[in-house]
Image (cartoon, grey):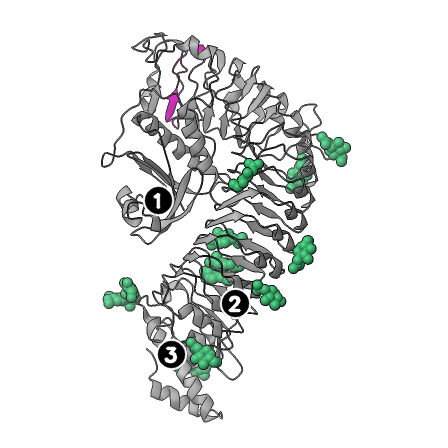
Amino acid sequence: MLIPTSILISFLLLFPITEAKVSQLDEEAHALLLTAWWSNQHNISNRCNWPGIRCNNAGSITEITSPPRKNYDTNNSSKDIDFSVFSNLVHLDLSGMQLYGFPKGLSGLKKLEFLNLSHNNLKDEPGFLSSLANLTQLLVLDLSYNYIGGQIPNEFSMLERLVTLNLSTNLFSGTIPLVLSHMSNLIYMNLSSNQLIGDLPTTLFTNLSNLETLDLSLNRFSGLIPQEIGNLTNLLTLDLSLNNFVGPIPDQVGYLNRLTTLNLDSNSINGSIPSSIGLLSHLEVLNIKDNQVGGFIPNELEHLVHLKALDLSYNGILGVIPKWISNLTQLDDIRLSGNQISGYIPSTILVHISHVDLSTNKLIGNVPFQISNVSYLDVSYNNLAGPIPEQIGYSNQLTVLHLDSNFFNGSIPSSIGLLAQIEMLTMGHNKIDGCIPIEMEHLFHLKGLDLSWNRFSGVIPSGLFVHPTLVDLSINNLSGSIPSIIGKNLSLLDLSYNNFSGNIPKGLDSVQSYNLECNPFLNGDYHYCQTQQNQSEYHKNNHNKGLSTLVWVLIIVASVLFSFGSIGIGICVLFARHSRRKLKVMTEKHGDLFSIWNYDGKIAFEDIVEATEDFHIRYCTGTGAYGSVYKAELPSGKTIALKKLHKTESENPSFYKSFCNEVKVLTEIRHRNIIKLYGYCMHNRCMFLVYE
Ligand SMILES: *[C@@H]1O[C@H](CO)[C@@H](O)[C@H](O)[C@H]1NC(C)=O
Ligand SMILES: *[C@@H]1O[C@H](CO)[C@@H](O)[C@H](O)[C@H]1NC(C)=O
Ligand SMILES: *[C@@H]1O[C@H](CO)[C@@H](O)[C@H](O)[C@H]1NC(C)=O
Ligand SMILES: *[C@@H]1O[C@H](CO)[C@@H](O)[C@H](O)[C@H]1NC(C)=O
Ligand SMILES: *[C@@H]1O[C@H](CO)[C@@H](O)[C@H](O)[C@H]1NC(C)=O
Ligand SMILES: *[C@@H]1O[C@H](CO)[C@@H](O)[C@H](O)[C@H]1NC(C)=O
Ligand SMILES: *[C@@H]1O[C@H](CO)[C@@H](O)[C@H](O)[C@H]1NC(C)=O
Ligand SMILES: *[C@@H]1O[C@H](CO)[C@@H](O)[C@H](O)[C@H]1NC(C)=O
Ligand SMILES: *[C@@H]1O[C@H](CO)[C@@H](O)[C@H](O)[C@H]1NC(C)=O
Ligand SMILES: *[C@@H]1O[C@H](CO)[C@@H](O)[C@H](O)[C@H]1NC(C)=O
Ligand SMILES: *[C@@H]1O[C@H](CO)[C@@H](O)[C@H](O)[C@H]1NC(C)=O
Ligand SMILES: *[C@@H]1O[C@H](CO)[C@@H](O)[C@H](O)[C@H]1NC(C)=O
């Protein structure tokens, strides 16, 4: 039970304090009761000890932090309170309180240094934000994760002491006000995930010299990246990803010698990688994927000894994979797919040869290699050639390896069986021959295996289907019988266009979709080859990459997967698919192909259409080369990001169905750099992906 105010007042009067203070403390107590956020607290005179409340020596409240969720009334209760009564308040955190309107009286809090209103349902209320200009003592302002739209008010520039400004994940639009350049104490500025447009004001870079973090990602900024970027010499993190920046990366980035993260992903940046990036000796993450960057990988990058993740995929990078890459011993994640890189995979990329110290170095057999730390290597869709190096097997941290759509030849080295962590292995669309090594049975964590469109021959190892979920061996010369041991996880199996013989194993019934088409010697009705091109023709010119629209669709999809979020994220390159396949028909929802998972099963296509008003431009938060990004709030209250592709080839339902399955499996792979993909959808001719 709450103590009636009259008792409270008389209680307070017992203490030798001035009348003025009594009435002020009384007002504070009264306001606190009105919030009803502490309805489980019964002793108002003890309020300074309530969770989230702090007082000064005089008993006046200086700090209010959202009480634990279960304790507060969600019924818009803060609306009635005038926060200005808390005149000594220094710290106010009302994050995640389900506020629908801004709390009243905030602008009167002259001593306020910290204000956190993130994760609410706040929308722009005319005049409110500009009234915050009165909070001249403010050091931290966090309004992120709301629905606040309109311009960023000029009045913010009066918050001269401000150190942290987090406006991310709102609906702010228009340009960055020039006067923000006055906030010279800013150390952290995050405007990501809004609808901001225009060129970046250069004064922002010349004046905010204390900035350590600048995140402008997922907006619609355009124009050149100003040379003045080089004046932010304290920057640790620079994220300009998912915008419409054009032109080259300015040489001046080389001045940012404290930088650890540089993310330029998904813009229209061209030119070549400036060698000055090699001066960024603290750099850990370099992401330039999905731009139009050409030229060679500059040798100066050799000096980036702290680099952990390098993503240059989907550009026009030429030349070879530099040998020195093996000297970057921290490098764990290398993504170079979708470029025009040629030459061989340097064997040192995978194995770092160190001074031999037998007491500390790990040995494999008699080979004194120190094991490489690379766990993710994607060089797919390039012009690489030659055999797959035998050293590959010594890179035993690898979880994902994409070699597909290159010109690799020779056979798979048996050392492949040493890749104990490998989950995804794709080598499709190459010229690899020989047998599938029996050692591949030992890849216990393997989920996806793509060896399609190669020249493999011989018999499949009998245990190959035990562990993986997806296996594509189509368009090869494999023969013998289909292994009868089928793992319970196997859900997609493509053996089409081979020379298998004998009976179909019973175990295949448990496989969700399989394709045995065009195996003339198989018992059953599998001799029919639907395409004009027969198998040998495939083998003759099996490398028509870049010509097949299907492959391009997959490149697009893969690049979309890659292009989300900040560092080194993405799923994997998807299996290039032969489009004609027999697949079990699965349930279709509302006549549209649709697949969503990981989402408590509560999401529906209609919800997405509704939440975005059929992909209305209003919900679009950015457009890139391949698609547009939308932000949508579902009826469940959850906010998701959607990336809708501009174009797709959607004539063949079974292609998409199998594609569905593949993406599903890919999302289940656990890798620390993979973001959560909730699902994707094909609808009429539109195709989109749903992210957290
Ligand atoms: C209420 O809190 C005050 C101050 O801590 C304390 O002196 C008093 O005994 C408490 N009253 C009750 C009923 O617990
Ligand atoms: C919120 O209001 C509804 C109806 O007005 C009421 O049923 C509910 O109990 C209230 N919630 C709380 C936590 O008091
Ligand atoms: C709070 O107020 C907003 C708008 O004023 C309304 O949409 C919402 O349903 C209210 N929430 C509750 C829990 O009453
Ligand atoms: C604001 O609150 C949210 C949610 O509690 C928290 O994640 C965030 O770190 C807080 N912001 C600051 C600047 O402390
Ligand atoms: C801002 O402060 C000025 C002077 O201190 C005051 O007159 C004005 O009412 C305040 N504005 C708001 C919105 O509180
Ligand atoms: C906003 O940015 C600050 C500064 O980095 C951070 O502490 C805070 O957690 C961010 N807010 C949210 C809701 O993540
Ligand atoms: C840059 O900072 C200087 C000094 O702090 C200030 O006088 C000037 O107005 C600022 N420029 C802009 C565009 O804010
Ligand atoms: C900026 O905010 C977004 C959304 O809250 C967050 O995901 C991102 O990590 C923040 N950026 C930085 C550099 O802190
Ligand atoms: C910006 O950097 C350039 C070159 O480093 C320098 O000449 C110039 O003085 C700097 N401008 C400011 C305002 O610091
Ligand atoms: C780079 O892009 C800019 C702006 O779109 C264009 O003017 C320039 O010609 C391009 N440069 C190259 C080398 O393609
Ligand atoms: C790697 O670094 C060592 C020592 O700095 C150097 O001798 C060697 O040439 C480098 N290797 C390559 C391929 O650059
Ligand atoms: C692998 O990473 C660990 C920890 O970051 C490091 O100590 C070790 O030297 C690295 N190994 C190689 C071969 O680079």
Q: As drawn, which residue projects farthest toward the left?
A: 590
Q: Name the residue tied to disc 3.
A: 31
Q: Residues within 10 Å of mark 1 (few under 14, many from 20)?
A: few
Does residue 305 appear in the picture of this structure?
no
With respect to residue 126, does 648 lie above or below?
above
Q: Which of the 4 image quadrants contains residue 283? A: top right
Which numbered disc, 2 or 3, marks the residue closer to the eye? 2
Cβ at disc 2 under 8 Å from ligand 7: yes
What is the magenta range? 478-497
Q: Quadrant of ligand 9?
A: bottom right
Q: Nearer the N terminus, badge 2 or badge 1?
A: 2
The residue at the point 53 percent across, 36 percent down is 292
Q: Is residue 49 magenta?
A: no
CA separation in Å, label 1 and label 3: 40 Å
Q: Is residue 307 left or right of residue 528?
A: right
Q: Name the residue tied to disc 2.
A: 157
**Residue 495, numbered circle:** none
Amino acid type, residue under disc 2 in the picture:
Ser
24 or 322, which lies in front?
A: 322
Q: Nearer the N terminus, badge 1 or badge 3?
A: 3
Q: Secondary structure at mark 2?
A: helix
